[in-house]
Image: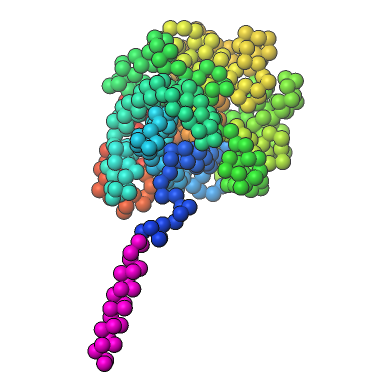
Amino acid sequence: MKKILTTVLILSVVFSFTACDKGFEKENTDPIGIISSPPEKLLAPALVNLLKTNLVRNRTFSNELMQVTVTMSDDENAVFRYDFRPSYADYTWNGWYSELTNIKDIYDIASTPEHQNDSYKGISRILESWVFSLLTDSYGDVPFTEANQGKTGLVEPVFDSQKDIYKALFSKLEEANTLLSGSTAAVVPSSDPVYHGDISLWRKFGNSLYLRLLLRVSAKAEVSSEVIAKIKEIIQDNPSKYPVFTSNNESAVLKWTGGTNVQDPFTNPYVMQYKEADFPLVALAYFFMQKLNEWHDPRIDLTNQYGHNSRNRLGIAPGGNGLVGIESGYVPGTVDMRQSYFYSSSNSEFSLQTSPLTGILMTCAEVEFIKAEAIAKGWVSGSASEHYYKGIANAINYWVPNFSTNITGAEFTSYISNAGLEWNDALPLDATTGDSKMERILLPKYFCLFITDFQQWFEYRRTGHPILPKGAGLQNGGKMPARLNYPTYLQSANPTNYSKAAANMGGDNINSLVWWQKP
């Protein structure tokens, strides 16, 4: 009897497990869960997260290096003194690479029969080029061909040379231009917070970005001839094939529409990242403030002298001693902290914390300055002064929409004259001190690139302009850092490839030149 009961019990258990296994996958599938995603679901979140990364590090890193802001501190590891902890490098590396996975997925998904869409593929290629350019211009050699393949088990990617990365980015931007020029596939407007589905504007952004990257490597003798030829083709020889920005309305900007609503996905990241009380802790630097103040610039029109109700569009509040910023690189203990301008808090009408205008990928003004430089260097025919003035006008008009973009109009010419910004063909092309055509172009371009990720820093490393004053308290021998170090965790997470990359860079330190900086 015991044997019979035991047998029955065993069979019951066996059959119960078999019954549970039957139809297991069907019964345990979440009927509302998402196991795959179409490309339109990935685009907006990736853009928001990338711009959050850019804005946070622009405020705490690039602005400090480039004398836009000064953190009021006598502590060590002050970025504005060219002295920062190696861990500073982690934030952008992690933020950029994590979203590259989503950007690459957009391309892969849009290549499948189910979701075939050349428009999303073209957008993906443009954004991939944008983000990888940020990575390689910040760090030098970085994972590229083997990057973002963790789901296949590749967790220790090789580092590609910056030269090879740039060549690949040019190919991706060519592909994007071809895809978008022939695509009739729709982009869901709500999925695209930059252009709301207008692929012709994405195409213009891709080619404008192409110009930026071509210019960045144009001084490298081994590629300069082909790079300059491509710049000429885009600007002069075949502009219809490579349309670029021609007005501020075409600039690549994610305009924050959420106000102070922290639940809105399109709320300015400054609202969620910082308290209002955090803003007065960062002062405006003397160099940045002095120029705008001397020029009586409409972007800080505190007296409303231009009559456009444009007052203080950059959201600046005066310090205790008036229109004076803090000298960057000051010796600890030597600065009167009242001598500063602060970012205004969110109760200001024009506050950077709630501004819809800070989500900049690239503006039309930058393209005009690129054209001015190309003409000044003799690569392209045309009027350098015309594009120089258009760059200044569009850069101001981005923040002050009512200010004149008519470069021959009385209002604009009066501003240029009063500011002493007239173009002068008699100036030398370049000089390490004093005035030159490059200084004339890069000084207003510096203000054009305000709040645009690390572009001020990249351009300074490329050109040495604008010529910045050097405070007596600077560390690092007074040398502007040439790159970000690699995140320290790579030494254990990817030791072999990290060591090879560090050796190829000439050492993993902030003074190792990236490829396009080397003679």
Q: Which residue is drawn at 56% across and 26% down?
A: 447
Q: Which residue is drawn at 43% across and 40% down?
A: 38
Q: Which residue is drawn at 38% across and 13% down?
A: 233
Choose between 138 and 164: the one closer to the eye. 164
Quadrant of the image for the C terminus? top left
Q: Which residue is drawn at 58% across and 30% down?
A: 287
Query: Compared to 68, does 71 lie above or below?
Result: below
Q: Is residue 20 magenta?
A: yes
Q: Does the magenta stretch include residue 502?
A: no
Choose between 146 and 24: the one closer to the eye. 24
Q: In which quarter of the image is residue 321?
A: top right
Q: Residue furthest bottom?
A: 1
- From the viewer's perspective, is 239 left or right of 286? left
Give the image location of residue 218, x and y in percent: 36, 21
Quadrant of the image for the N terminus? bottom left
Report if residue 256 is visible in the image.
yes
Report if residue 214 is visible in the image.
no
Residue range of the region highlighted in magenta in the rendering: 1-24
- From the viewer's perspective, is 33 left or right of 342? left
Choose between 406 and 221: the one closer to the eye. 406
Give the image location of residue 388, x and y in percent: 53, 14
